[in-house]
């Protein structure tokens, strides 16, 4: 875990894991932590823009990114956009 580097106390490490929700995705190849998070978020945003529910599910499963609004986003991605646009155009 990134935040527990150098911590020798197992109980302190456990507390840190609970506080951080055990989320520690960080790809050092992407640079600083903020750059890694930025890349991860941009990848997710690109998938949302493509409206690809299968890729979205795979992204959430493999990256385990904690995204606020992931459930509503998933619901919208299940909607057939052509039906939605037709409905909006004829209401």
Image: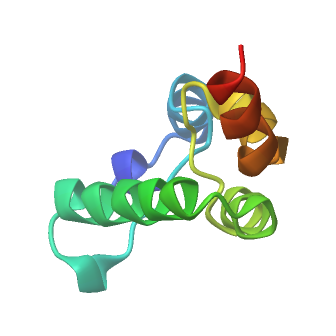
- Residue 70 location in percent, x, y? 66, 34
For the point 84% across and 45% down, the residue is 78
Left or right: residue 89 compared with residue 20 = right
For the point 44% across and 49% down, the residue is 8
Quadrant of the rendered image containing residue 89: top right
- Residue 39 location in percent, x, y? 31, 66
Relative vertical location of residue 26 with respect to residue 38 in this rendering, above or below: below
Relative vertical location of residue 17 with respect to residue 55 in this rendering, above or below: above
Does residue 7 appear in the picture of this structure?
A: no
- Residue 87 location in percent, x, y? 76, 27
- Residue 55 location in percent, x, y? 72, 70
Does residue 15 appear in the picture of this structure?
A: yes
Relative vertical location of residue 16 with respect to residue 44 in this rendering, above or below: above
For the point 55% across and 53% down, the residue is 48
Left or right: residue 30 compared with residue 2 = left
Q: Residue furthest bottom?
A: 29
Depth order, front residue of 35/80:
80
Quadrant of the rendered image containing residue 72: top right
Depth order, front residue of 1/11:
1
For the point 55% across and 36% down, the residue is 67
Depth order, front residue of 76/22:
76
Left or right: residue 36 compared with residue 65 = left
Quarter containing the C terminus: top right
């Amino acid at each position: 875990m990134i935040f527990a580097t150098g911590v020798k106390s197992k109980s302190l490490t456990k507390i840190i894991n609970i506080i951080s929700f055990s989320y520690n995705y960080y790809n050092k190849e992407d640079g600083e932590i903020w750059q890694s998070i930025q890349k991860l978020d941009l990848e997710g945003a690109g998938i949302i823009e493509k409206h690809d529910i299968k890729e979205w599910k795979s992204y959430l499963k493999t990256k385990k990114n904690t995204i606020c609004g992931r459930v509503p986003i998933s619901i919208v991605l299940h909607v057939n956009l052509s039906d939605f646009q037709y409905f909006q155009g004829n209401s």
